[in-house]
Image (cartoon, helix red, strand yellow):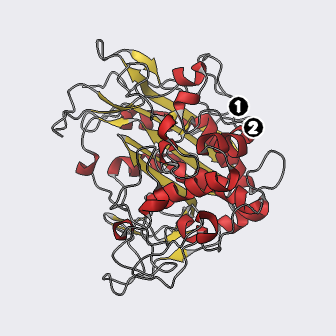
């Protein structure tokens, strides 16, 4: 039985046409003449993934670049599903703004590196310089905590105490509590992926600039690159709010998945009116808590915007077009800060790889090393051959990711806006990703990124 929501809407394969869409952001990157021979088969393969009756998707949007240029772009499903008529709603498009979960972190990191470039942040300064009091892991009081450690997940901060707080809470006070820190590892040496690193980072960015985090990111990163959307929809124009995708699951309130049941809004349901009111910023003190603006996972961006971002990252600050930050800071970003030592056991290893998914890390960006085993590793294409940089994300039903390799000029990004069944039921065959993520990345890699 076909899922009526998995409707192919617009595939861009160089000069191939598509239906006229309402005005959106400018074309994200130049396209050259000549269509990809594999594009029709790729479109069918992606449509089948979105339409899988065992694991239906509310929506799927992808974009891929080769030689620094957009070579394929497609969207399937809907950005909003009418609960009264589930087969109808608003279509997912290339200009739809989607919350991209932890992919937001790598964009936040660009903003932080721009401040490093401007001398407002120092990668290796003790955080005490910015907060006015010591910031220490209580198990290692002799070891300063730095911005470099936040950006590389080697600060030993953890998420046990939370990472999203009410506006009046001071994140800086929270750092004085033992539960904010991981129970193992030494700062600067141990890798432990933690959202709290980015809550602290966003708060520091506010402190050194005097600007609210979401507005700072719009001013310093997104708008210079020609990207709309952002981190805080209540501040947006009406056109941007109308293009925001709702995130969904077919999961009841008791946690039961129902692949033939109704789609339940999880986040950003502005069209359906179920989204709760935004945080009361009257109780917020600037520079103490950036979490209301979610530097960890709150960026809403379109595949058009992701293509602009990827085109800039592939250029590495060189050639025509804007760059945020500049070439020198981007080069710093891609210097390895941590690499798994491959040892087994907590005492011998140098970090938590989460099933082999994390093998190496730069400044705010993961290094994909192409390591693989059944259910383990960071491989993106079944046949292997893709090494480069990027980030993955998961929140509120969304599964997202981006990959880019400046050496080859290849890049891709994908956004799933909701699952109709438990994604845990299909584990990866050659990586630690879910099976559906593997199928999406492998399809794009085989066609656009030329790993056949």
Horizontal and vertical percent position of residue 34: 70, 35
Which residue is under mark 1? 27
Identify the residue shown where x is 30% and y is 12%: 85
Residue 303: in sight, yes or no?
Answer: yes
62 w.r.t. 288: above or below:
above
**Which image quarter: residue 430?**
bottom left
Which is more toward the observer, 131 or 404?
131
Q: Do the residues labelled 1 and 2 touch (CB within 8 Å)?
A: yes
How busy is the neighbourhood of tag 2: few (under 14 within 10 Å), some, or many (20 plus)? few
Q: Which is in the foreground here, disc 1 or disc 2? A: 1
258 w.r.t. 430: above or below:
above
283 w.r.t. 185: above or below:
above
Which is more toward the observer, 176 or 19?
176
**Number of the label disc, if any, that sits on residue 283:** none
How busy is the neighbourhood of tag 1: few (under 14 within 10 Å), some, or many (20 plus)? some
**Which image quarter: residue 250?**
top left
Horizontal and vertical percent position of residue 304: 62, 35
Residue 94: in sight, yes or no?
Answer: no
206 w.r.t. 149: above or below:
above
Which residue is under mark 2? 30
Horizontal and vertical percent position of residue 124: 65, 74
Which is more toward the observer, 378 or 243?
243
Say left or right for 202 vs 185: right
Classify mark 1: helix, strand or loop: loop
Q: Residue furthest right?
A: 320
Identify the residue shown where x is 50% and y is 35%: 282
For the N terminus, give its image quadrant.
Answer: top left
């Amino acid at each position: 039985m076909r899922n009526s929501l998995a409707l192919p809407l617009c595939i861009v394969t160089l000069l191939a046409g598509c239906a006229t869409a309402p005005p959106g952001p400018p074309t994200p990157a130049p396209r050259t003449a000549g269509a990809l021979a594999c594009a029709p088969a790729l479109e069918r393969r992606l449509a089948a993934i979105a339409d899988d009756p065992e694991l239906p998707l509310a929506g799927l949007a992808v974009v891929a670049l080769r030689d620094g240029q957009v070579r394929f772009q497609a969207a399937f499903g809907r950005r909003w599903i009418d609960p009264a008529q589930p087969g109808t709603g608003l279509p997912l498009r290339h200009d739809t703004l989607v919350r991209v979960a932890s992919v937001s972190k790598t964009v936040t990191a660009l903003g932080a590196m721009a401040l490093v470039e401007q001398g407002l942040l120092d990668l290796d300064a003790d955080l005490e310089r910015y907060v006015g009091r010591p910031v220490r892991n209580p198990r290692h009081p002799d070891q300063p905590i730095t911005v470099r450690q936040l950006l590389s997940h080697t600060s030993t901060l953890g998420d046990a105490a939370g990472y999203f707080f009410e506006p009046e809470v001071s994140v800086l006070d929270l750092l004085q509590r033992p539960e904010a820190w991981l129970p193992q590892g030494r700062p600067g040496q141990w890798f432990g992926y933690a959202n709290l690193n980015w809550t602290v980072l966003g708060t520091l960015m506010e402190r050194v600039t005097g600007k609210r985090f979401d507005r700072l990111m719009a001013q310093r990163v997104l708008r210079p690159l020609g990207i709309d959307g952002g981190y805080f929809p209540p501040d947006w124009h009406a056109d941007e709010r109308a293009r925001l995708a709702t995130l969904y699951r077919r999961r009841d309130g008791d946690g039961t998945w129902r692949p033939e049941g109704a789609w339940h809004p999880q986040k950003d349901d502005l069209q359906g009116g179920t989204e709760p009111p935004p945080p009361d910023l009257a109780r917020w003190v600037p520079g103490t808590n950036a979490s209301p603006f979610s530097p960890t996972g709150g960026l809403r961006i379109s595949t058009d915007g992701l293509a602009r971002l990827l085109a800039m990252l592939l250029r590495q600050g060189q050639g025509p077009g804007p760059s945020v930050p500049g070439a020198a800071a981007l080069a710093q970003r891609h210097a390895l800060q941590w690499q798994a030592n491959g040892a087994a056991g907590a005492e011998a290893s140098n970090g938590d790889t989460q099933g082999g998914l994390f093998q190496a890390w730069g400044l705010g960006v993961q290094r994909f090393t192409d390591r693989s085993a059944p259910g383990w590793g960071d491989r993106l294409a079944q046949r292997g051959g893709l090494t480069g940089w990027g980030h993955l994300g998961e929140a509120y039903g969304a599964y997202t990711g981006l990959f880019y390799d400046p050496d080859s000029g290849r890049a891709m990004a994908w956004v799933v806006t909701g699952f109709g069944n438990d994604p845990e039921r299909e584990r990866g065959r050659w990586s630690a990703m879910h099976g559906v993520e593997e199928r999406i990345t492998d399809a794009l890699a085989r066609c656009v990124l030329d790993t056949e």
